[in-house]
Image (cartoon, rainbow, N blue to C red):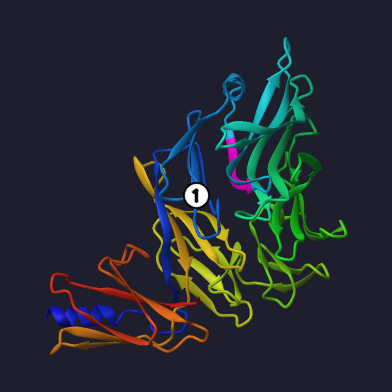
């Protein structure tokens, strides 16, 4: 009876081409309970991952997963600023600098409200710090006035740093650092009651000799391109006292060599402008293109060239030179669209929350997921999507007590990774891993296991 059950379970593995995209655990680490902030990146090189997190007023970090965890207590002046004005650390970013190539660098952003005594008014400032973690010293600091609050005038403003990003992204040495801020002003009073949300992105130029503020832009998102250009999204939103919504989104293109910026208004008023949506960059449409919401915009002509049924959130290639797949979060799994063929696939079930995407220079990469940040320890996983060969055939041979796996070859694959799991819910967590160069292999059945699950993915090296 056991063999019948085993054969039935194995027969449930989908056989259609690219129906399920396997997810392999490329790396993982543990975080303590409820960190204030955390990030993982290709920090020191493109073969490893490093991470950092803040608890209380101390930064804990490992430049590479597996390294001993180090600590860095923020300077007292910074701690005093955060505590005195009731603000907190808002965003961190892990990167390096060309002037300090072997040193882990941390960028930190926060906002503070400074009271104007004796009144109840206050000014809002954005603070930006850059630390050399090997020397444990501050190497750059910038304070920027962002607005103020006034009871007498009947309005107040708030500011939040959404993220700090670098271009090119880690582990390359950045030439620019972006601090993306959301700025909201609530106007109160007869005929003037409205909430205005805008974005102010500070752009810092980074050279061998210096770090300096270049300009402040209305960008609410940035996507760096492989050719050195920069695509941006500008956002504005206003809600009146009668819940009327006005807003706009403009997709732009910044040419790094000519320093020419041009843009296209893709959304003006109404429900599509209600929220800023993630965007993805893709070359799958024959030219560099944005995917913003469900719109595809050609960045060379700045025209809308296609409308997708679903909203892309990021792009990843399954293998170097392969098509750039457009991805979005489907809850229990991710969905992937090949915009060239129109095929839509899903990944294995994912148990956890989505954090970010870490891309390699060839367009491949990993998706970062966490299990539960409120637990005493929580697992952080870098999940790598891979190509699933077509027509996986499973044959059970009871007289020899083994099963035979066979599949169709994948063009360009140099090997195949076969994963055996005993728990279907442990996505990508293989109990046994085998790499073969043929398109068939066999496994002896474990007599102590009531069921077994297999995935096969192509390797391109």
Lateral position of residue 327 relative to residue 266, left or right? left
x and y, in percent, of residue 70 in the image: 45, 37
x and y, in percent, of residue 233 in the image: 74, 55
Q: Is residue 92 magenta?
A: yes
x and y, in percent, of residue 83 in the image: 57, 21
Query: Quarter-wise, where is residue 306 in the image?
Result: bottom right
- Residue beneath the point at 68% across and 45% down: 99
At mark 1, the secondary structure is: strand
- Residue beneath the point at 63% across and 31% down: 138
Residue 97 visible in rendering? yes
Lateral position of residue 405 relative to residue 146, left or right? left
Residue 275 visible in rendering? no
- Residue beneath the point at 51% across and 60% down: 47
Lateral position of residue 219 relative to residue 369, left or right? right
Q: Quadrant of the N terminus?
A: bottom left
Q: Is residue 448 above or below residue 240?
A: below
The span picked out in magenta is 90-96
- The residue nearer to you, when weighing 77 against 275, is 77
Judge the density around disc 1: few (<14), some (14-19), many (≥20) Cα neighbours within 10 Å: many
x and y, in percent, of residue 17 in the image: 46, 84
Query: Quarter-wise, where is residue 137 in the image?
Result: top right
- The residue nearer to you, when weighing 260 against 245, is 260
């Amino acid at each position: 009876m056991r063999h019948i059950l085993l054969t039935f379970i194995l027969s449930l593995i989908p056989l259609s081409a690219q129906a399920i995209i396997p997810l392999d655990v490329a790396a993982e680490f543990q975080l303590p309970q409820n960190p204030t902030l955390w990030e993982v990146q290709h920090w020191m090189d493109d073969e490893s991952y490093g991470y950092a997190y803040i608890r209380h007023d101390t930064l804990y970090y490992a430049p590479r997963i597996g390294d001993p965890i180090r600590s860095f207590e923020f300077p007292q002046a910074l701690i005093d600023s955060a505590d005195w004005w009731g603000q907190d650390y808002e965003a961190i970013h892990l990167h390096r600098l060309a002037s300090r190539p072997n040193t882990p660098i941390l960028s930190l952003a926060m906002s503070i409200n400074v009271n104007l005594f004796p009144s109840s008014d206050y000014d809002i400032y954005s603070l930006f710090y850059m630390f050399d973690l090997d020397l444990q010293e501050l190497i750059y600091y910038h304070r920027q006035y962002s607005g103020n609050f006034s009871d007498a005038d009947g309005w107040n403003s708030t500011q939040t740093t959404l993220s700090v990003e670098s271009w090119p992204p880690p582990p390359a040495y950045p030439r620019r650092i972006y601090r993306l801020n959301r700025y909201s002003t609530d106007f109160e009073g007869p005929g003037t009651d409205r909430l205005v949300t805008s974005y102010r992105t500070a752009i810092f130029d980074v050279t061998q000799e210096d770090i300096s503020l270049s300009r402040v832009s209305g960008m609410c998102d940035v996507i760096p391109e492989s050719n050195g250009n920069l695509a941006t999204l500008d956002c504005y939103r206003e809600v009146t006292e009668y819940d009327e919504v006005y807003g706009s989104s403009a997709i732009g293109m910044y040419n790094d060599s000519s320093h020419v910026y041009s843009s296209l208004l893709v959304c003006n008023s109404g429900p599509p402008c209600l929220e800023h949506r993630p965007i993805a960059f893709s070359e799958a449409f024959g030219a560099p293109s944005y995917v913003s919401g469900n719109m595809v915009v050609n960045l060379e002509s700045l025209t809308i060239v296609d409308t997708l049924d679903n909203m892309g959130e990021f792009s990843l290639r399954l293998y170097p030179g392969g098509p750039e797949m457009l991805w979005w979060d489907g809850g229990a799994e991710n969905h992937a669209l090949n915009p060239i063929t129109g095929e839509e696939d899903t990944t294995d079930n994912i148990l956890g929350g989505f954090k970010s995407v870490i891309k390699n220079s060839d367009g491949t990469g990993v998706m970062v997921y966490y299990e539960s940040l409120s637990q005493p320890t929580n697992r952080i996983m870098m999940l790598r999507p891979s190509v699933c060969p077509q027509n996986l055939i499973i044959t059970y041979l009871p007289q020899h007590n083994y099963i035979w796996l066979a599949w169709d070859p994948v063009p360009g694959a140099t090997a195949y990774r076969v994963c055996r799991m005993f728990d279907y819910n442990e996505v990508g967590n293989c109990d046994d891993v085998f790499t073969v160069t043929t398109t068939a292999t066999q496994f002896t059945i474990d007599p102590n296991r009531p069921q077994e699950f297999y995935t096969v993915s192509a390797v391109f090296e």
